[in-house]
Image (cartoon, rainbow, N blue to C red):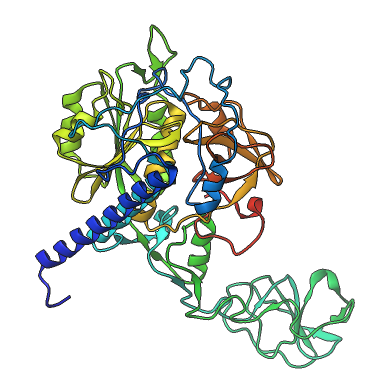
Amino acid sequence: MSGQSAESLAAQARAAEDGAVDEALALVNEARAADGRGAGGTGVPGAAGSGGGHSGRAGSGTGRPGPERGSAERSRRTEPATPTSHTDHPGHPDPTRHSAPADQRTGSRHQAAPWSAARAVAGRAGRAAAARRGGTAERRVPLDRALGLTLAEPLAALSDLPSFDTSAMDGWVVAGPGPWDVRAEGILAGQDRPEPLSDGEAVQIATGARVPRDATAVIRSEHGRTDDKGRLFALGDVGHGQDIRPRGQECRSGDQLLPTGALVTPAVLGLAAAAGYDELLTVARPRVEVFILGDELLTEGLPREGLIRDALGPMLPAWLRALGAEVTSVRRLGDDPKALLKAVRASDADLIVTTGGTASGPVDHVHPTLSSLDAELLVDGVAVRPGHPMLLARTKEGQHLVGLPGNPLAAVSGLLTLAEPLLRMLAGRPEQEPYTVPLQRAVHGHPHDTRLVPVVVRGEDAVPLRYNGPAMLRGIAAADGLAVVAPGGAKAGREVEILDLPWSWNPAGDDGGDVSAERCFT
């Protein structure tokens, strides 16, 4: 590094970022070609149609399979499609009837990006943004502020655990064979270097107290008795070292306890404290601003006179924090294009998240705003239901914007499709290992697009939930995750990928166990 100028390093970072994004965009075109739906000459994914408004505006939801499954995925597309039904979306338009709006800069029309390719673009954009700033931003924080962050370095033990031989039980610590003469004064936790024992001696000891030198074992209170002469008798055999936790039983100083990227949970905080830490080196949370769009939204009270309650304002900040972000502000901008343009220009966040306005209606101002900023559209519409008008743009060096549809479940789809992969890279979190679960009953599908359906996992099966329309939150509020359903739907018993919700899994990961055992609250 010493021979390179700051300008040279910045140029290398920009080249790496551009190369990573170009590679991801190439995946979009390859996926389109594999689908037989056009390769897309510009390399920029297209918008997928109407439905970008808030709850009560147009939009619907049905689906297609999850992250790259290669020939197996393509072979399923050759099966006869399950007839599409929209009885679970009463009052919503047929999701197959939409047209792709014109690109804001070129005026051309193009196909939406396949769902798995869009996620790949978002992940690589996050990786490139992290590379631009020289890797993930790091900071040392005290233990009481580290919950929910990820480790920026391995957690190595700073001392042996335990750091001395300790009693695992209340009882007596003894030396040699019994019976034993019991000393008058006991040993309590916190006492340093108790007097050594001679053969035939015993002393009362508390759990966690330091065991004296030359001790043979600890006899639990319920496993011994004393006579009127002060002698201790064991009620059963006494094994050498029983109920003594030897020094270093859990780990030795320098042992790696957790890898880089492990999520700091309450248990990790306890482990770090026990291992001698006062602070942890963690990855700084990426900073996110949320802009709530729409004049029809109320912030309190009951819906009235054509106005509806804003569901995304209360939901998105908490969801983004669960994805590893620091939400610096939530601003309500209504349907004011000037306010939106000013807010995006002034933002210094790593990521801007907007709600609604991503389609081509009279109050959909996100595309014109991005055009005014000469932003680069990385994903402009995704072949997924709900949420197809979502988008991802690079607005300035190191900054991105995710435009979410305004319907609540469609916005959740956008979060997990575009925001989650990008934020995961910026926050230094490892990718969740994908897994599949058989469906308990059939799920209707979209003819061409991925469908994300709220499910609960019960035993070995995923149970689809009824309330899965794009404007509905009742299903996702009760869900364990979203099932990724292939075009044409899935029959009962079909294995489908499950996208866990961010608070239902631990990115540090377990080595084994079934799906339900690996879930934990984070």
Q: In the picture provided, is 171 more to the left or to the right than 520? A: right
Q: Residue at x 36, y 55 (%)?
A: 425
Does 372 sit above or below residue 508? above
Q: In the picture provided, is 147 more to the left or to the right than 242? A: left
Which quarter of the picture shows residue 145?
Answer: bottom left
Does 11 sit above or below residue 52? below
Does 65 sit above or below residue 412? below
Does 375 sit above or below residue 511? above
In front: 435, or 49? 49
Quadrant location, the N terminus: bottom left
In front: 215, or 423? 423
- Total tally of numbered discs in the picture: 0
Res 504 seen here:
no
Q: Residue at x 55, y 47 (%)?
A: 75
Q: In the picture provided, is 212 more to the left or to the right than 296? A: right
Find residue 103 and report its horizontal and vertical position in percent: 23, 32
Res 316 seen here:
yes
Q: In the picture provided, is 339 more to the left or to the right than 305? A: left
Outermost residue toward the bottom?
199
Find residue 429 and report its horizontal and vertical position in percent: 42, 57
Q: Residue at x 59, y 84 (%)?
A: 193
In front: 335, or 405? 405
Find residue 453 and report its horizontal and vertical position in percent: 55, 34
Which quarter of the picture shows residue 36?
Answer: top left
Find residue 201 and report its horizontal and vertical position in percent: 77, 88
Which quarter of the picture shows residue 509?
Answer: bottom right
